[in-house]
Image (cartoon, grey):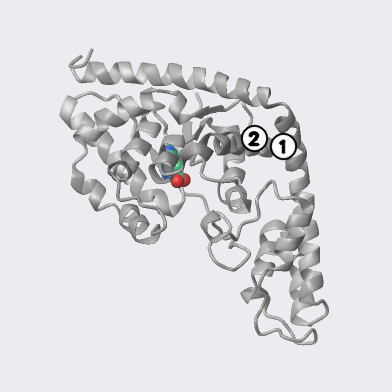
Amino acid sequence: MKKTVLSGMRPTGKLHLGHLVGALNNWLKLQKEYQCFFMVADWHALMSEYKSPSGISNFAVDNVIDWLSCGIDPESSVIFVQSQVKEHLELYMVLSCLVPLGWLERCPTYKEQKKELKAKDISNYAFLGYPVLQAADILLYKADCVPVGEDQLPHLEICREIVRRFKSLYKKDVFVEPQALLTKVPRLLGIDGRKMSKSYDNTIALSDSPEMITKKVSSMFTDPKRIKRTDVGHPKQCNVYNYYEVFKPELKDEVYNWCTKAELGCTECKQKLAGILIEQLSPIQQKRAHFESHKDLVTDILRDGQKQAAEFAANTMKEVKEALGNGLL
Ligand code: TRP
């Protein structure tokens, strides 16, 4: 029997190279080894996008198209939308009752996001419960493992504490304590050298056209100490070089030499990089074009995923209600 993995993404924008390197490439590996559930976390998106929520469903479909185009396989993995499986909110409610406020108020991601996301008003009631809904997502499918970035570790810890609390309250072993799968992912910054993020407008989207990719790459900052074409560069401090390391490691020694010996200028170096990115995204974009002109395929995949997820989730909810002594109808 394969172990189970659950992971999710919030549909708040188009997917970009950061998602590919940080999550999707890892998902592709996981789906071979595990029974995977890949979820569009649209309720989680609503928590921060509630002031203009109309884009969420479009991003949901758009993100799933990227997953499929990258090779996430609906034959082996369950691909579904959180809000289409009603049990997520039911379990969220049950868990909300047994989670002490302090666990959530102390959560470092909560404190950080409130400080950082000044543009969005997330001092709402739901946002405090973000990790509780995430725990419900994971526990409904009894996931053994959850691939997470370090930033999400506190959420997984809360999830594990919830499992223990549930067990100590109801003396029933309904849930599995999930393990974090901390995978080392390459570091990839945005085109301006800051963290790649939609809110910084510094991403290269998986669906960007070749022209757009060329334009964005040509605007990337390079080594600031290399002013003239004849100056030698310092690749270790250059974001463009980092992209070579991530996307074309077999070329990185060559690029290193070009740069440190001033054999190649930054403009040419970036043109080459743009070509590499365009080439690597091309097969993904071809599949994307196919799904975009056959949206019914995506609808079918999501309907099928919903069915499979809902069946599993309903079973778990039944066990949960039994554990609560059938105190709810
Ligand atoms: N919080 C995750 C993120 O922002 C998204 C998410 C929601 C998730 N539910 C999940 C991830 C369950 C893993 C498991 O990336």
Name the residue that disc number 1 marks. Answer: 288
Tell me the quarter of the picture where residue 238 sits.
bottom right
Contact between labelled residues 2 and 1, with CB atoms less than 8 Å apart: yes
Name the residue that disc number 2 marks. Answer: 65
* Mark 2 residue element: helix
Q: Where on the image, by quarter, is ligand 1?
A: top left
Give the residue at x 41% y 42%: 50
State whether residue 200 is above or below residue 138. Answer: below
| Disc number for residue 82 | none
Residue 116 x %, y %: 39, 60
Image quarter hosting the C terminus = top left
Q: Residues within 10 Å of mark 2 (few under 14, many from 20)?
A: many
Residue 212 x %, y %: 74, 56
**Sequence-earlier tag: 1 or 2:** 2
**How many labels sit on residues?**
2
Residue 96 x %, y %: 24, 34
Considering depth in this image, is 290 or 2 the residue closer to the camera? 290
Q: Residues within 10 Å of mark 1 (few under 14, many from 20)?
A: many
Residue 79 x %, y %: 55, 28
Is ligand 1 closer than 8 angstroms to the Cβ of mark 1? Answer: no
State whether residue 310 is above or below residue 132. Answer: above
